[in-house]
Image (spheres, rainbow, N blue to C red):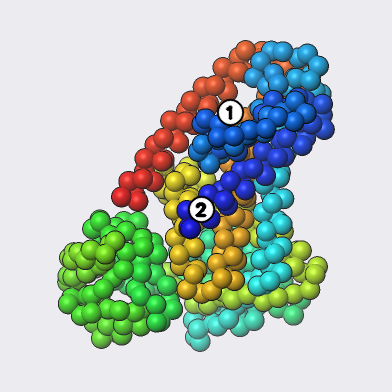
Amino acid sequence: MKIILALLIFSAVVLFHELGHFLLAKKNGIEVLEFSLGMGPRLFHIEKGGTVYSVKLFPLGGSCMMAGEDEEDDSPGTFHSASVWGRFCVIAAGPVFNFILAFLFSLIIVGLVGYIPATVQTVEQDSPAYESGLREGDLITEFDGYHIDISDDLNIYLNAVGIPQERIQMKVKRDGQEMTIFYEPEYQTRYLLGFNRSTIEDEPLEISSLIKGLPLEKTGIQPGDRITAINGTKIETNADYDKYMEKHPLADQKEVEITYEHHGKETTVSVVPASYESVILGFQYNLSREKGGVLTTVKYSLLEVKYWIRTTILSLKELILGKYSVKDLSGPVGVVNVIGNTYEQSKEEGTFWVWMNMLNMAVLLSANLGVMNLLPIPALDGGRLIFILIEAIFRRPVNRRVEGMVHFAGFMLLMALMVFVMYNDIMRLL
């Protein structure tokens, strides 16, 4: 079931992207030879109005094949027979439709469960944050120069970039007035094993993610595995883990034996807790949702889409800066696996939350696909838009044969990257 659901979401996002190309191509008088879902050999097809509509064997991807798209032909009905701005709209429509789909799904989510304002919930007494003037109820609008619309903005920034070590600068709204807060943060030394988990007390201690460079990452343990014992003490829930750590702080232990379950098989590994000096924010912010009226729902639905677009761009920036590596990328196999895992974890919360989490995954995927396709890389929509813009500026097209060769070379490089990413996805699963 989880694989079918994942493929349906992935296929819907890709199909809507291709629908954008298709509708704008028809609008601009360009003949669409084939509109397909999937890749590989055709499973079945029908022909209508000169277009072949087909479903292919591998339900990952899709295409809108237009007449003369990668050729020098500019006869009536071909891609290059359309005006420059007509072609620009056809190519841009795919990513734009992804953003529209993300907005429509966000409307459903925000309408049913609400949005998450970045409100300060608590401020530690006598902390630098409190002394600087930060108070409970303040609405955070900017953190370290990064604009904050919702709590997720702050959350992703802290995870991707981190807390500033020398000075924290924030902008907050209080009673409609904007204030700027400055303070030097405090530090604390923590001892870590290197994993993240759910905080729901009665749930099994399941690893949701591993922290790069910390001890558990090197042991072979994987996200989704469950810790069942520590130093021989049975651990059944998150609450058991919290109680154990309260009695046996990691700072007092030179070595820790971790027993974990992977696909029904238990393994025990020994790790040395790593000391880690972390910056203390000095405050906690809201992570719960609240509902609003129609205009508020529309506003925050747009902000949800904006959040996912910015998150994708921020992740790409950190990838370029070296914080992430190519090995951290996920392809279709990894995406399907993440959707499947989200489905499995959501089942315990009920059918309603399964659908909400699936829609949220669709928003993430659709916004991500839109941004990635706009990158100025040959063979992607962004690369094709660059050539069209050059033609618009200089009022003559780049040599079609040269453009075709550039796109083909870009396509081959993208295929090589896709194979590498899919290999990493499969190895992570194994």
Q: How much space separates mark 1 and mark 2, taking CA atoms? A: 29 Å
Disc 2 packing (10 Å; few <14; some 14–19; many ≥20): few
The residue where tag 2 is placed is: 4
Relative to 121, residue 364 above or below = above
Kindly identify which numbered label has been placed on residue 391: none
| Residue 18: image location, x then y, percent | 67, 38
Depth check: give the residue in front, 418 or 387.
Answer: 418
Tell me which amino acid carries mark 1. Ala
Relative to 224, residue 124 above or below = below
Q: Which mark lies nearer to you, 1 or 2? A: 2
Q: Is residue 245 left or right of residue 338?
A: left
Q: Is residue 323 left or right of residue 284?
A: left
Mark yes or no: residue 391 visible.
no
Relative to 10, residue 382 above or below = above
Q: Is residue 360 left or right of residue 430?
A: right
Local SS, label 2: helix
Local SS, label 1: loop
Q: Are marks 1 and 2 in contact (CB under 8 Å)?
A: no
| Residue 147: image location, x then y, percent | 64, 60
Mark yes or no: residue 421 visible.
yes
